Amino acid sequence: METFYVTTPIYYANSLPHLGHLYTMIVADTIARQKRQQRIETFFLTGTDEHGINIERAAQRNNRTPKQQADYVVSYFKKMTAAFGLDTEHGGYDIFMRTTERFHYEGVSEFWRRVAKAKTPKGRDALYKGHYEGWFCAACAAYKTEDEYAKAANPDETPTCLVHETKLDRVSEESYFFRLSDYDAALLSLYESRPEFVLPDVRRNEVRSFVQSGLQDLSVSRLWSSVSWGVPVPDDPNHTMYVWFDALINYITAIGFGNEQQRAVGFEKFWPALHLVGKDILRFHAVYWPAFLMAAEVEQPRAIVAHGMWLDPNGRKMSKTLGNTIDLDVLNKYFSTDAIRYFCLRDMVFGQDGRFGYENLIDRTNSDLASGLGNLSSRTLTMIQRYCDGRIPERNISDEGLLRAKRAGVDTDEAAVSDFVAHARDEFIRYFDNFAFSRALEEAWAIVARVDKMISDAKPWDLAKDASQKQTLNAVLYRAAESLRWLSVLLYPVIPHAARDAYAQLGLTDDPSKIDPGNLKWGQLSEGAETGEVKPLFPRIDKAKTMEELGNETKASGAHATEAGVAPESLAEPETKPAPPMKGATEADAERSTTAGTPALPAQKEIGEGLIEITDFSKIDLRVGEVRSAERIPKADKLLLMTVDIGEEKPRQILAGIAQYYEPEKLVGRKIVVVANLKPRKLRGYESRGMLLAASVGEEGKPVIATFAEDVPNGARLK
Ligand code: MSP
């Protein structure tokens, strides 16, 4: 029997998952469901990466041991995957892999031993002991070369990671090295001989040029005394393995490499895997991992397929560090899992970056799902209920009937519809197999449009008024119902719940998850079969109301779902609500003018001794803004209503409690500092989207607006 193995990356257990993580799981889950439909025995792995300095530090911050930290995040992950129908119980992943499993330690140790004995393609030892001297980013879990960090102005100061904008760690210690530099030719010939090994093409080219530009040996261990939270190096307890070395091997230990416990899953049966990864971690998968596998003499993966990044509406990568992630609790609360799955696959062109906006998600749900597929299903089934006693009508039109149908202006050629549907099905599968999910879904929706048009042209409601057109009416409704059967099967991997519902509403009792879309034959919907109860597949979302509710969500967007501070017992309730990161005098004043509130202090638990991490600070998006207009607000003597240009499409409206100290006219044209990622809030009926920074002077807290001595462009970031 054919087998298939698909993996997501294993996610760091230092913080809670967000949309970026959910996305890869949705893609992997969709692929796994489609393979299973095709009767291919499929194994789907996801899980957590639990070692390394970053987890150690997150644990310290939360007063936990590293294992407790990992357990905590894992329990949230598992709740999340269950809520989104991605776990084993809902037909999703087969294993939630954890790198703290005993069997993983065994497998990794076996792998290390093999590499330790191996010779490189150039005949030298693949592993050697040396001394590492350089910079390491804990958040990337990667060593950084000079072009990968920003040097501080003062050469004595620590440089910062270009990805995370956090300080690097200086590492100067004994280390085992993997002789990666000897693998360039072997890797290049691998990419050459297997063009499908790294996908999409643009990523393969990147990987190829990276290798062509020369590889450096890779430090693959740390001294136990500096990083104790890792897999011990076999026969050398002074060292722990580099976290990526241990993490990558999870893909094979999970299916039984080097250990007894997982042997039954079947390394021989399932390996090689298709690895789905974000483009930011491609190098680890497409360069380091294949080289490690060459050294250990293990077969190469089937392919490494890289997707793009989810960006926020302003085009910045969604990330924990920037604090602009999409909160999974909120997604789960307002949207069905099918709508989220559909959106992820339809809206993001696989491989490219995509912007996420709730408005977009609501629009797609309403147009494509509720008005499109959902409406086609309910109008077809309602007409079958009404005109055909709730039974699948007869398909064929007699010769005599054909003439009558033509007279009514109905296209009698069934093949016009069935050929269209079959062709779209073939295209759907072709695109799907090439990871072009968005294009595949366009094909499916072409079926929806085609059948909708057939119905509108034939006007069954008119045909129903004429008894002599009964056959015509039946044939039209049969074609619509049969198309819906095909759509349910085709779309099952993407929208499993709705597909099953649609299928059941057609009165079918088997399961679309077990039907290979490639084997669908037109006309197999049984005439006379009783249809099920008609229920809407996708209720319409009230956009205005939902947008308002989303805006009113008390939790700062994303922050609580990404920090390790959320109670795993609930998908919705944070253990401690993170306090607003910072409050400037202006907002505090604005607040006093309405609520007499005092600025909240940052929660002690989050910041230890009153100090914050640079990562905490970088959550705040500070931008240079230029005041475009400023005016007083009637009956609010402290507030000014301003519009401020911070380099976005149009200026933002911001309220500030500075009216007693500044003449509005004098502010126009002034450069100020704006907190750009503050949740919008309403003051006196006006929405304020951000806050300006000002010093708070003297006992009365007189605001003095922060400004610049030099000329600075609008939108420039302060950091
Ligand atoms: N632990 C490593 C992976 C080891 S695999 C042997 C890791 N973990 S991670 O938690 O930081 O990231 C996991 C995945 O999430 C990566 O594929 C990354 O691309 C993805 N995403 C994180 N933010 C993302 C977006 N904003 N958009 C899409 N995916 C993103 O790296």
Image: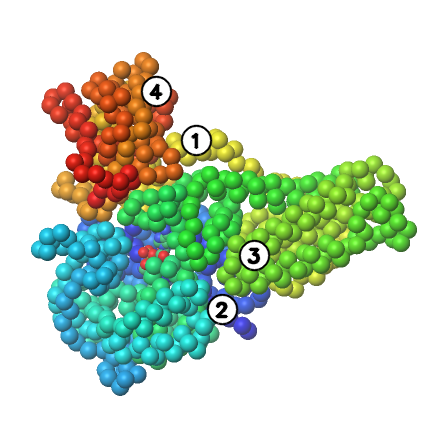
Amino acid under disc 2: Phe
Q: Residue furthest top?
A: 635
Q: Which residue is mark 4?
A: 684
Pointer 1 with pointer 3, Cβ within 8 A? no
**Badge 4 element:** loop
Pointer 4 with pointer 3, Cβ within 8 A? no
Q: How far apart are the two marked residues, 2 and 4, measured between alpha carbons?
A: 59 Å
Q: Residue at x 61, y 46 (%)?
A: 373
**Badge 1 element:** helix
Task: Name the N-terminal-most of marks 1 and 3.
Answer: 3
Q: Which residue is mark 3?
A: 440
**Badge 2 element:** strand
Nearer to me, 336 or 648: 648
Q: Residue at x 28, y 33 (%)?
A: 626
Q: How far apart are the two marked residues, 2 and 1, measured between alpha carbons?
A: 44 Å
Q: How far apart are the two marked residues, 1 and 4, measured between alpha carbons?
A: 17 Å
